[in-house]
Image (cartoon, rainbow, N blue to C red):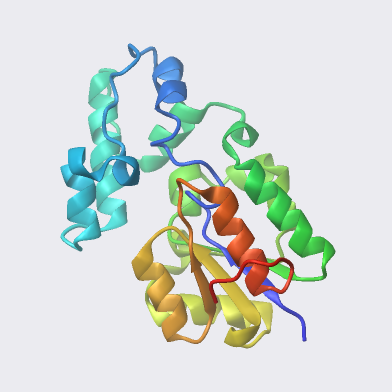
Amino acid sequence: MTRALVLDFGGVISRTLFETHHLTESALGLPGGTLTWRGPFDPDNDGLWRDMQAGNISERGYWMARTREVGTLVGEKWDRMETFVRRARGADPDAVIRPEAVRAIIRAKEAGCKLAILSNELDLFYGEGFRSELALLKLFDVIVDATHTGVLKPDPRAYEMCLGQLGLPAHACVFVDDQPRNVEGARNVGLQAVHFDVAQPGKSYAAALGCLALGEESEC
């Protein structure tokens, strides 16, 4: 049976904005050390992140708050998350793609697996033109983005849309996401699922490949 690797984008394929504060500060002309919020890397000192993890605000709500905050720092009013991401990451999206992601994606593709992205905000964060700028995305068979569908993970319908486009049963697919609620949502509809640890990307991808029987390590 054909299998599929289904990936979230932000945090899983690309490095998080938390990991690239130095690049953001340089791109925006901010002094080094200006951005101190670090989400999962330092939750004790990021109250907004803790609120998001507790379900008090949405992930989109978290990033919209950070967007407005950083816009204020540069003396501008930012009302779109795309503005933050594009200004912070410049014209070279490949520079923030995880090398572990590239290796795993190519490994799965060469093994005959289908590839899918299931994201809550791919185009919302990066803008619609981003897809044509990132060569890696051309390897994917399916991209389901809640920016356009309006159905956000962990709603079961989001996973079902992706499965429908892949033409595969849930048990043939391995889903990878850095948000525990989305991993749980995937498991609830029958997908194999791996929680992506942004602090250990290599280990997380090894687990995902193991679930596809393409490696030794497996959490599924």
Q: Nearer the viewer, residue 206 or 139?
A: 206
Give the position of the C terminus as an image quadrant.
bottom right
Labels in figure, total: 0
Please report the residue visible at 48 percent of the width from the left and 32 percent of the height from the top: 86
Q: Quadrant of residue 1?
A: bottom right
Q: Percent position (x, y) of residue 169?
A: 63, 88
Left or right relative to 19: residue 34: left
**Considering only vertical position in the picture, is 120 above or below 80?**
below
Q: Residue 164, can we see it? A: yes
Q: Residue 77, can we see it? A: no
Q: Quadrant of residue 76?
A: top left
Left or right relative to 59: residue 20: right
Q: Quadrant of residue 155?
A: bottom left
Q: Nearer the viewer, residue 100 or 58?
A: 100
Left or right relative to 135: residue 219: left
Q: Nearer the viewer, residue 155 or 195?
A: 195
**Considering only vertical position in the picture, is 193 above or below 80?**
below
**Considering only vertical position in the picture, is 25 above or below 4?**
above
Q: Percent position (x, y) of residue 180?
A: 37, 65
Please report the residue visible at 20 percent of the width from the left and 63 percent of the height from the top: 55
Q: Percent position (x, y) of residue 142?
A: 66, 67
Q: Percent position (x, y) of residue 58?
A: 25, 58
Please report the residue visible at 64 percent of the width from the left and 50 percent of the height from the top: 101
Please report the residue visible at 26 percent of the width from the left and 28 percent of the height from the top: 36
